[in-house]
């Protein structure tokens, strides 16, 4: 626990007050999550729906669960009763399903649009034009049980800091543009989820408000 406590203190010391630390807990055992909770962490991020569903009832109810991995439409119903924030909305079809399942659970579910900013085929996400078309669609305007609270993006996995910096800067610029054009009066459009263990310093420098950190907290798997 001492090592984890030290990691939490060191990372939080580097973070401005407006940045939220989401502890990436995928594949980590319940005992480690309980340690993290006892040390004050409350935002946990999972990539896989099944893992989140298995862990959620075993841990304290005030944990805020973040779905940060690619989400299939047929899995939304399993997390709709309790998920705090879905970071990975990458299609209108998925957003419509979240809206449907939120209605069934009498909830409004907060979501982020995942924007494709990396130079890697393996990454998911909308391009800027697709995101704008979604926000302009009749289907989006009819949704009552979701809130778009910001954007998420993953930079290229590279040692070239300038590439990462440029990609994060482009996402921040697009966030500002959407805020101005579509969410001016929406005080909940505040989240810019970018930055992981290897690049969160650059992400914070470029305006991130939410970093998703696993290895730098818990060590290598």
Image (cartoon, helix red, strand yellow):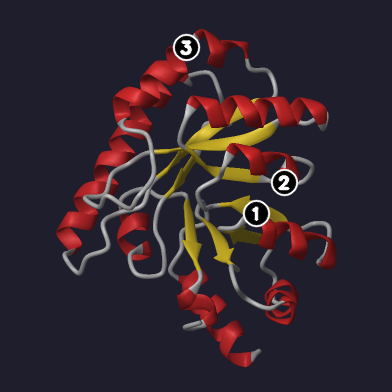
Q: Which residue is mark 3?
A: 137
Q: Are marks 1 and 2 in contact (CB under 8 Å)?
A: yes
Under tag 2, what secondary structure? helix
State the residue at coordinates (77%, 25%): 103
Judge depth for marks 3 and 1 and give the one in front: 1
Badge 2 density bin: few <14, some 14–19, many ≥20, Cα 10 Å = many
Task: Please identify the quarter of the rendering in which residue 63 is found.
Answer: bottom right
Of the numbered discs in the image, which one, if any, rests on residue 87?
none
Mark 3 / mark 1, whichever is N-terminal: 1
Of the numbered discs in the image, which one, if any, rests on residue 79?
2
State the residue at coordinates (51%, 69%): 12
Which image quadrant: the N terminus? bottom right
In the shown orientation, is residue 194 left or right of residue 146? Answer: left
Badge 1 density bin: few <14, some 14–19, many ≥20, Cα 10 Å = some
Instruction: Return the residue nearer the eye: 124 or 83.
Output: 124
Mark 1 / mark 2, whichever is N-terminal: 1
State the residue at coordinates (67%, 62%): 51
Of the numbered discs in the image, which one, if any, rests on residue 49?
1
State the residue at coordinates (35%, 50%): 123
């Amino acid at each position: 626990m001492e090592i984890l406590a030290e990691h939490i203190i060191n990372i939080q010391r580097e973070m401005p007050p407006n940045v939220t630390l989401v502890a990436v807990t995928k594949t980590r055992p319940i005992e480690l999550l309980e340690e993290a909770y006892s040390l004050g962490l409350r935002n946990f991020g999972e990539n896989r729906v099944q893992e989140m569903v298995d862990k959620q009832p075993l841990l304290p109810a005030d944990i805020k669960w973040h779905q940060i991995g690619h989400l299939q439409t047929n899995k939304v119903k399993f997390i709709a009763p309790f998920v705090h924030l879905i970071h990975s909305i990458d299609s209108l079809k998925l957003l419509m399903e979240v809206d449907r399942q939120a209605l069934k659970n009498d909830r409004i579910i907060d979501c982020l649009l995942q924007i494709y900013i990396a130079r890697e085929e393996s990454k998911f996400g909308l391009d800027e034009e697709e995101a704008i078309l979604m926000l302009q669609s009749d289907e989006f305007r009819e949704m009552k049980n979701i809130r778009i609270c910001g954007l998420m993006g993953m930079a290229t996995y590279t040692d070239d800091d300038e590439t990462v910096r440029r990609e994060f800067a482009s996402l921040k610029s697009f966030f500002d543009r959407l805020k101005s054009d579509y969410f001016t009066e929406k005080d909940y459009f505040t989240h810019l989820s970018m930055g992981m263990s290897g690049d969160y310093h650059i992400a914070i420098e470029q305006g991130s408000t939410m970093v998703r950190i696993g290895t730098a907290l818990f060590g290598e798997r």
